[in-house]
Image (cartoon, helix red, strand yellow):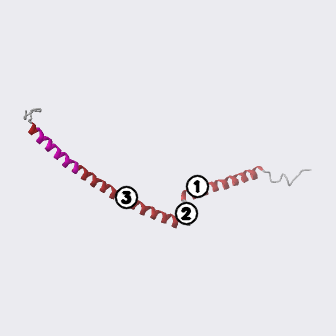
């Protein structure tokens, strides 16, 4: 009864296969754990570097905003649009005045026949 055959293997062969599988599993587990640690370390380093870079960029943009705040530059498009609207209003008033003058008879008020 020492030699119990399991799927064609003896008890000793089965035990040696189990031992080899256990050792391989331990080695793989250590390898997976080490790989996981290294990947996490790399990700932490990268995220720290990215966070630091964004902090620097944020500081630079804040400084630029503070320096440009007193300048108060109006965009060229907005200025041109405002000027076009102003010119349009002036032209409408001018045309209305011309129409009023053209429709008025000059001597009507001055000369009154008897």
Mark 1 vs mark 2: give the one in front: 2
Q: Do residues under tags 1 and 2 come within 8 Å of each other at their CB atoms? A: no
**Which residue bears the numbered disc 2?**
73
Q: Is residue 20 magenta?
A: yes
Return the x and y of residue 59 as percentages of the image width and height: 45, 64
Which of label 1 and label 3 is nearer to you? 3
Distance, label 1 to label 3, CA atoms, is: 42 Å
Question: Image height check: is 68 above or below 81?
Answer: below
Side of 14 relative to 35 (left or right): left
Q: Residue furthest right?
A: 114
Residue picked out by circle 1: 81
Magenta region: which residues?
A: 14-30
Where residue 68 appears, as percent x and y from the top left, is: 52, 65
* Earlier-in-chain disc, 1 versus 3: 3
Q: Earlier in the sequence, mark 2 or mark 3?
A: 3
The residue that disc 3 covers is 50
**In the rendered image, which quarter contains the N terminus?**
top left
Residue 31 position within the rendered picture, expressed as x and y whole percent measured from the top left:
21, 51
- Residue 79 figure quarter: bottom right
């Amino acid at each position: 009864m020492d030699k119990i055959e399991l799927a064609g293997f003896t008890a000793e062969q089965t035990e040696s296969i189990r031992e080899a599988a256990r050792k391989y599993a331990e080695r793989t587990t250590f390898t997976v754990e080490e790989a996981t640690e290294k990947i996490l370390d790399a990700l932490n380093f990268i995220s720290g570097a990215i966070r630091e870079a964004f902090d620097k960029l944020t500081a630079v943009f804040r400084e630029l905003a503070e320096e440009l705040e007193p300048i108060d530059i109006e965009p060229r498009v907005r200025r041109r649009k405002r000027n076009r609207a102003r010119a349009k209003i002036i032209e409408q008033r001018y045309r209305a005045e011309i129409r009023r003058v053209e429709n008025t008879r000059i001597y009507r008020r001055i000369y009154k026949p008897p």
